[in-house]
Amino acid sequence: MIDTGDNTVIRRACHTGQRLHLDRKCRTSDCRSIVMHNGQRGADEWQVIVVGAGNAGLCAGVAALQAGATSVAVLDAAPKNLRGGNSSLTRTMRFAWRGSSFIASLLGEAHRGRVDEILAGQQGYTEEQYLEDWLRVSGDQVDVALIKSIIDRSNSTIAWMRDFGQRWAPRPKPLPGDVPIVLDGGGEGLQNRNFTQFERLGGTILYDSRVTGFEKAPDGRYLIRGPGTVFPLFADSLVLASAGFEANPRMREHHLGEQWRNVKLRGVPFNDGAPLAAAIEFGADTAGSWEECHATPQGIKLPDYMLPGQMHKSHGLARYAFPWGIVVNRHGRRFFDESGEYSNLSYVTLGQNILKQPDGIAFQIFDNKVVEAGVLPDGYLGDPTAVVAESIEEGARRLGIDVENLVAEVRRLNSEGNDTVPATRDATTRTPKRLDTPPFLFSPVVCGLTFTYGGLSVTANAEVRGGGEPIDGLYAAGVIVGGLYHHGYPGGTGLMAGAVLGRAAGMAAAAHAIRMGGTTSADNLAR
């Protein structure tokens, strides 16, 4: 920083090769001078910058503005017409709750009078039940204290989101154990309302702004780098909410294994892991399982990746009703306990295992009792790759499944009676599962990768750790945070964790920026 003596401060940011640096003495021809008159900030200087425009990032942006920051930018790697991220393709948030009145307060006017019907006898979901479910399926390589802090704030965070305009609706065709309500309009509705609130409060979104690195400037602020025209940028506080490395084939192969290099994505192609790698280079501590990821069973028509605006297509490809039937591989062998857990607690474990099967494919099989009961989502019934067969043998032959092995598996299932159809947690009796009523529906499924588990180590206040201690002014939220999952994944926890930590990050980032004496002018852009 150079004071010219006439109330003008000059900051220089210079590209030397691939790295951007600040140098008071630099005189190279590509050195940019950023001029601030009378202490007012230029268009590239912000109190708070949030990297990532998914649910976590927008929650951080909203919270920062509510906490008193008046100069907040959210950077989105995608163009404006493809904004929304993976959050726009989902619909469920898992939260603790007690009593129907709270659920009713989340519903739109048209559904509030139906709350008892929607809950179907459910009285609540306690923090203790939530924690038990999360730890039972996630494995032991997790940050229990962080998870508990997220769960303990889930109810209040949902109320906060409700208060700034979020709404929920009844879940169509719920399976036992499902969260009874989903976001109104799904992830698209969630993100549209998030963007609206952030911009209404005065926030700015910078599109096509992929972040590739950052460092500390001499004055203690963050200098953020990237290939876009908006860079370089300066921020008093920096929030990283830019997902994992799920869209980066090389990083997938390096961390997850060779079989994951060419896997299909359930999400967007923009999450390349560059901000995560930059944070590690900066000195951030890592956490979580870097060898595993969130992956789920999907219809075999799943494209290489999904885009915002394709939410309904994404939901139609989900194949999560497997507890009503059996799952076999090409050899006709079952490789997964379909009845061992609720679908929304075990679907990720199944997705991970599908990739390990011959040809990376599996087959979910149901009999006519299940089809006639109307419990299968519409995606199953409208799948052009599904096969309806009058016998198990016919279906196996048509799909290239080992006939003899599959017939033996079905015979074993029907005779032993050890498997049961889905039921609620407190059900006193269980109905044995049998595939004995033709015709049979065969649904081919593949693995779809959603996000990676390895990420940054953070405190309960979303402060990024470096050397075991919080790094001043650096925060993280969303999938870029590690330590939340090891093996399995409880459905709806990703959006919830992102909202809780996003809110915490935004509040802390605003407080840090204000302590630094950052501008309170809302005119840092000529807008």
Image (spheres, rainbow, N blue to C red):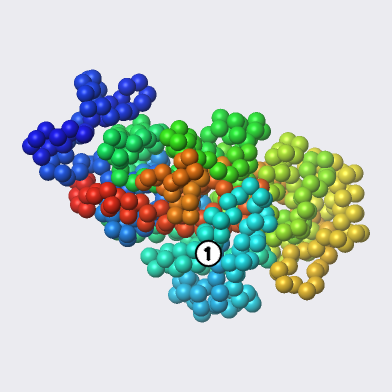
* Horizontal side of residue 102 vs 427, given as left or right: left
Which residue: 80% across, 69% down?
Answer: 430
Residue 102 percent coordinates (x, y): 50, 74
Which residue: 52% across, 64% down?
Answer: 152
Q: Nearer the viewer, residue 378 or 177?
A: 177
Q: Nearer the viewer, residue 33 or 401?
A: 33
Q: Quadrant of the N terminus?
A: top left
- Where on the picture, by quarter, is residue 292? top right
Q: Nearer the viewer, residue 518 or 321?
A: 518
Q: Is residue 312 depicted above or below 182 in this figure?
A: above
Q: Is residue 3 depicted above or below 132 in this figure?
A: above
> At numbered mark 1, what does the secondary structure look like: helix, strand or loop?
helix
Residue 397 percent coordinates (x, y): 83, 42
Disc 1 residue type (three-letter):
Asp
* Other-residue count near label 1 (Cα within 10 Å), few / some / many at <14 / 14–19 / ≥20: some
> On the image, numbered disc 1 is attached to which residue?
152
Residue 484 percent coordinates (x, y): 57, 50
Which residue: 38% across, 65% down?
Answer: 164
